[in-house]
Image (spheres, rainbow, N blue to C red):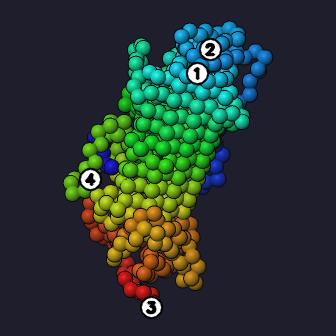
Amino acid sequence: MKRLKIFIPFLIIIMVLVSGCSSTATNSTASSTAKTVTETAAGLTAVVSSTSTIAVDPEFTDRDLETTYDDSTAVHVTLDGSNIQVSGDGATASNGVLTITKEGTYVVTGNLTDGQIVVAAADTDKIQIVLNGATINCADNAPIYIKSANKVFITLNQNTVNSLTDSSAYVQTDENTVDGVIFSKADLTINGAGTLNITTNFNHGIVSKDDLIITGGTFNITSADNALSGKNSVKIKDGVVNITSSNGKGITSKNADDTTKGYVYICGGTITIKNSTEGIEGTAIIIEGGTIDLVSQDDGFNSASASAAETDTGAKGGGAAMENDANCYLSIAGGTIKVNATGDGLDSNGSLYVTGGTIFVSGPTNGGNGALDYNGTAEISGGTIIVAGSIGMAQGFSDTSTQCSLLYNLTTACAAGTEIKLTDASGNTIASFTPDKTYQSVVISTPDLAQGSTYTLTCGSQTVDIPLTAVVTSNGQTGMGGPGQGGTQGGKQDGGARPQPQTTQPQSTSV
């Protein structure tokens, strides 16, 4: 849903970094509102907004990726019902609580019926917790509570299954408001080749009040609220992440205290969000790789500042245009993405950039939402995208794009399961997609589209020939109701001549 925002101009602060996920995505031909990242941050291939202060760090350290450890020097912890046995220095156990106070590696095995692991180390200490077939339930707090450390690494040992569960309420024990099955006040990295099952009955799945980094492992998270939350950032390089979060967000990062932080960066892995209020949310969202398949009750992707995200009223349409939030953007440079959103499909309270990847969106059936929704510009210079949704708030790409696109609003709605197919003059299929829900508006862009050519769009019994007379061709309307034209910005009228597509009906069917 669109949030009411106050526009504040920002100066760009971009960190210059040298490594991160590799990507084959092509950099955008930048307009005045965007910069190619090769000009600003060598580790990224995605476009960043020139007006955003978000400092995206695409780098993963060697330690983030390291999953081995020296077993001979590690502290071994055995969980046995309500008892905890510790072999080595740096940790103590009392009344079902393991307290880690010193830098080192701690290998945890066994079953704890009611207790927790607490990390209370110096802010210079790095702690590695190896879950080696560990099951921990905590009746009144987080099974793993990282109170203090420099950085904590949770390694999921290969071929092990580890499980964490909580109860229906937390009893706070100090100044921190603990609200996740794994709760960390320090930077947190989770890696390895094992499995972590998380079931929450109270609140969130994994929470970091700093950075949350995932570089490996299999995660099965069923959360009462947000599944993955990092205040400064959430970064995913690899792993399999399965999320069910019917009352919360799948992945979220926002920071009301620091406008340079609060972003989601994904460059690998397989992420499935089976249910969520909003699938992936951050002030900035940058996707460079991976496979993402999400279902959301509201927005699929939502780029929104922390204040805007917290004050969503769900009001859209019929009022004054929402202002562009200069700090927000959604940038997709790679990966395979499928979105099924009841609210907006791809939503940015700022701008949207697509330079690569394959994207399919089954957007809203409610005319008060849009399958594409942005307040700044939406520029495409690469990749393949097919978007289907309702007609009321339909937007297409901006005419500052360098790759051709079309927005077409159909005469009548098509039922769920009706294929969208675009063919060229020779009958070759350029793009196709079968949406999960009813739709009446279609946006398509692929590298195969060429200005000056004519294409045939078929949606069930409706067939239309569309000449691409401009980089953006549209017969549609903006989210606020202006008539669309060829050569548009998001379908807005720009004074150009409107193309006149010719609608035909298959002989054997009728509209």
Between residue 30 and residue 228, name the one nearer to us: 228
Q: CA distance from mark 3 to mark 1?
A: 69 Å
| Residue assigned mark 4 | 316
| Residue assigned mark 2 | 84
Task: Assess disc 2: are there few (<14), some (14-19) or many (≥20) residues with their C-alpha within 10 Å of its C-alpha.
Answer: many
| Residue assigned mark 3 | 507
Task: Assess disc 3: are there few (<14), some (14-19) or many (≥20) residues with their C-alpha within 10 Å of its C-alpha.
Answer: few
Q: Secondary structure at mark 2?
A: strand
Q: CA distance from mark 4 to mark 3?
A: 40 Å
Q: Earlier in the sequence, mark 4 or mark 3?
A: 4
Q: CA distance from mark 1 to mark 2?
A: 8 Å
Q: Earlier in the sequence, mark 1 or mark 4?
A: 1
Q: Earlier in the sequence, mark 2 or mark 3?
A: 2
Marks 2 and 4 close (CB-CB < 8 Å): no
Q: Earlier in the sequence, mark 2 or mark 4?
A: 2
Q: CA distance from mark 2 to mark 3?
A: 76 Å
Residue type at the position of mark 2: Ile
- Counting from the top left corner in percent of width and height, residue 284 is at 45, 42
Q: Secondary structure at mark 1?
A: strand
> Residue shown at 48%/44% (left/top)?
244
Residue type at the position of mark 4: Lys
Residue type at the position of mark 3: Gln
Between residue 119 and residue 327, name the one nearer to us: 119
> Residue shown at 55%/22% (left/top)?
113
Placement of 302 over or under 462, stated as above or below: above
Residue type at the position of mark 1: Leu
Image quadrant where residue 491 sits = bottom left
Marks 1 and 2 close (CB-CB < 8 Å): yes
> Residue shown at 32%/37% (left/top)?
310
Marks 3 and 1 close (CB-CB < 8 Å): no
| Residue assigned mark 1 | 112
* Quarter of the rendering occupied by the C terminus: bottom left
